[in-house]
Amino acid sequence: MKKEDLLLQIKGIIDKGLPLVSNLSNVSSILNKLEDINWCGFYLVKEDTLYLGPFQGDVACTVILKGKGVCGTSLLEKKTIIVEDVTKHPNHIACSSISRSEIVTPIIKDNEVKGVIDIDSPSINRFNNEDKVFLEQVAETLSPLFK
Ligand code: SME
């Protein structure tokens, strides 16, 4: 399915009246329609630390400190990070031995990172600028759901 259609589905399914976990669970299911990925989901910020949120894929690490791993770096730097080859990235936290490349996009509200979207692929160099633009649109769409 095309990214534009996934974004439309996300816009159509989210409901501000629902608990955040309900919305993010369904969004993780929609993101899981992206091709050639083995994990997608959310880490949510609580007191400057990331905690595992709704996701699709194998069991993952539950706590990531700010500045640690790709997710913690995205939290710290408030920007999307693309890792072409996780085995060559010094600051990568390996949750799954299958993952070879990764993209992480922060969800920002009122200039604060509220969480990150994390997607892993079993292929090297899976993510490009088009994925970055898409995930930043998803993050912007989800931002109003956060307190
Ligand atoms: N690889 C991430 C950890 C989370 S898993 O990919 C699900 C990182 O380096 O932050």
Image: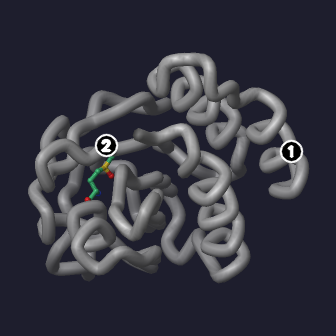
Residue at x 78% of width, y 40% of height: 11
| Label 1 beta carbon less than 8 Å to ligand 1 | no
Q: Is residue 137 left or right of residue 110?
A: right
Q: Secondary structure at mark 2?
A: strand
- Residue 121 location, x and y as percent? 51, 56
- Chosen colour scheme: one colour
**Is residue 80 shown above or below 40?**
below
Q: Is residue 85 left or right of residue 5?
A: left
Can you tell which quarter of the image residue 131 is in? bottom right
Q: Amino acid at mark 2?
A: Leu
The circle on residue 8 is 1
Q: Secondary structure at mark 1?
A: helix
The disc, 2 or 1, on the residue closer to the chain's N-terminal end is 1
Tag 2: Cα neighbours inside 10 Å, few (<14), some, or many (≥20)?
many
Pointer 2 residue: 44
Which of the pair 73/36 is nearer the observer? 73
Residue at x 42% of width, y 29% of height: 54
Mark 2 and mark 1: Cα distance apart in space: 23 Å
Displayed-image quarter of ligand 1:
bottom left
Which of the pair 55/18 is nearer the observer? 18
- Residue 63 location, x and y as percent? 13, 42
Q: Is residue 14 left or right of residue 69?
A: right
Residue at x 57% of width, y 46% of height: 144
Residue at x 53% of width, y 25% of height: 25
Q: Is residue 138 left or right of residue 119?
A: right
**Is residue 117 shown above or below 83?**
above
Quarter occupied by the C terminus: top left
- Residue 9 location, x and y as percent? 83, 37
Tag 1: Cα neighbours inside 10 Å, few (<14), some, or many (≥20)?
few
